[in-house]
Amino acid sequence: MHDVRSLSQQRFSARAENYVQSQLHSSGYTLERLIALLQPLSGKLALDVATGGGHVALRLAQHGARVVASDLTPAMLKAARAHLSGQRSLVSYAQVEASHLPFRAKSLDVITVRHAPHHFPDVPRFLSECARALKPDGKLGIVDQIAPELPEAARYINALERLRDPSHNWQFRLSDWHAMLHAAALEIAHSEVATVRLELYQWTRLQKNDAETVLRLRVLLHQAPQAVRAFLKPTFHDDGSGNISFDHHYGIFIARKAE
């Protein structure tokens, strides 16, 4: 587990600015939907876990929340601080590990995490920490990529993701998320799946993949079993570029502490 954390720090330290500039992370339906579902935010104390480029933290602050932007990787926090430096917003910064939130019980109004839990070595522990730190009427907002329900297809997708990014730990199915939230005594107030169309070269550029890795990913997409193809819906471009477009599916969850 410590190796997973070290690898995440190593890779994201070298790619911090990519995530500040990433269109997938800085905008889009999942970001706007997450913020809308967490309203009202004015005056609330919010923790943004694995803040990355600080995009969620900024949107929370723009809606009146007092925000702690946290990340495991100091370079990401530095990049987020630089990104938000020109904004008039109530944001502070802290190096925090997701499975050990340094906040008192029942002290936070809102906790958010977007595009990150698939890197966490212990998601159930993270959810338990959220349940502990949230106030009785507090909200947990999660956005993360999800895998297909068929176990064999889920394993194939995770192998694909881990080849692109070795710090990828596990991409859960929608049913897994529901079960884990329930086990952490968190009631699901909202659950939906959003689909984003990505291109292979865009996706691999974010992680600075070398040509060999891109080729291996292309082969895996070409050779994907039917269940994986049905999930990703790959389109193999015939313009000579070798590029491939495919679907990425994201779960959007709002949970409250169970009474």
Image (cartoon, grey):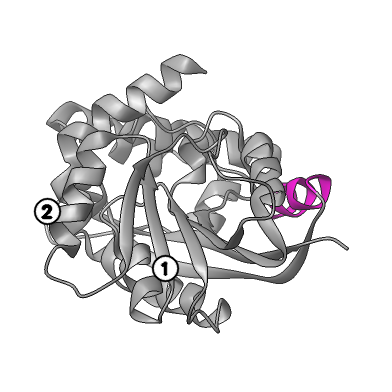
- The numbered disc on residue 50 is none
Name the magenta segment's main secondary structure.
helix
Residue at the location (30% across, 72% down)?
27
Identity of the residue furthest to the right in this view: 259
Left or right: 127 as drawn, with respect to 252: right
Under mark 2, the amino acid is: Ser
Measured as percent of width and height from the top left, residue 25 is found at 31, 61
Residue at the location (40% across, 80% down)?
64
Residue 109 visible to the viewer = yes
**54, above or below 76, in the image:** below
Which picture quadrant has residue 4? top left
Left or right: 74 as drawn, with respect to 56: left
Badge 2 density bin: few <14, some 14–19, many ≥20, Cα 10 Å: few
Left or right: 27 as drawn, with respect to 37: left
Q: Which residues are magenta?
A: 174-184
Q: Secondary structure at mark 1?
A: strand
Disc 1 to disc 2, C-alpha distance: 46 Å
- The numbered disc on residue 66 is 1
**52, above or below 169, in the image:** below
Left or right: 130 as drawn, with respect to 242: right
Residue at the location (40% across, 56% down)?
68
Measured as percent of width and height from the top left, residue 127 is found at 66, 45
Q: Is residue 182 covered in magenta?
A: yes
Between disc 1 and disc 2, the foreground one is 1
Q: Secondary structure at mark 2?
A: loop
Please name whichever residue, 62 or 33, is drawn nearer the observer in this view of the structure: 62
Residue located beneath label 2 in the image:
241
Asked if marks 1 and 2 touch (Cβ < 8 Å), the reply is no
